[in-house]
Image (spheres, helix red, strand yellow):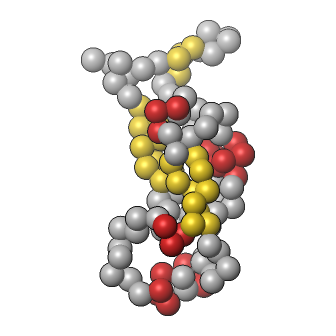
């Protein structure tokens, strides 16, 4: 079985890649993905409210300036509605930290 495909106005076939993950640990909360997304896929959330995969990290290590975080960086992006993604990957193209993971979907 193949992947879902699309066709451009010029008749060129392409394979959309839909968002499957957003690495909040790398996210700096800049909002570029939110602005670039033509759908309602993302939302800004408090960093403290996110479900961190590495809960055993202490705050000093997690918010260290070497990682690109500071104490005043309190918001990060989250996937609000994954099913609304159209697979254009605009969010990935504007993300300075490469936080998004996309994959084609089987037809």
Q: Taking 67 as reference, is 104 left or right?
A: left
Q: Is residue 59 above or below residue 69?
A: below
Q: Is residue 37 left or right of residue 14?
A: right
Q: Quadrant of residue 91?
A: top right
Q: Is residue 17 visible?
A: no
Asked whether residue 3 is in view, the answer is yes
Give the answer, above or below, for where 91 lies relative to 31.
above
Q: Is residue 18 or residue 31 the one in the foreground?
A: 31
26 or 56: nearer the eye? 56
The residue at 70%/42% (across/down) is: 36
Residue 51 quadrant: bottom left
Residue found at x 38% / y 28%: 105
Drawn side of residue 1 relative to residue 89, left or right: left
Q: Position of residue 67 (x, y in %)?
A: 55, 78
Residue 74 at x, y percent in the picture: 62, 73
Q: Position of residue 39 (x, y in %)?
A: 62, 34
In the image, residue 54 above or below residue 82? below
Indicate the quadrant containing the N terminus: top left, top right, bottom left or bottom right.
Answer: top left
Q: Residue furthest left?
A: 1
Residue 64 in picture, x, y percent from top left: 55, 86
């Amino acid at each position: 079985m193949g992947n879902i495909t699309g066709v451009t106005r010029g008749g060129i076939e392409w394979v959309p890649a839909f968002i499957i993950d957003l690495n909040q640990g790398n996210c700096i909360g800049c909002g570029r993905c939110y602005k670039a997304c033509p759908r309602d896929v993302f939302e800004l959330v408090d960093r403290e409210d996110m479900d961190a995969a590495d809960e055993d990290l202490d705050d000093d290590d997690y918010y260290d300036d070497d990682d690109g975080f500071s104490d005043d960086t309190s918001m990060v992006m989250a996937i609000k509605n994954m099913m609304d993604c159209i697979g254009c990957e605009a969010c990935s193209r504007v993300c300075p930290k490469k936080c998004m993971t996309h994959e084609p979907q089987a037809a």
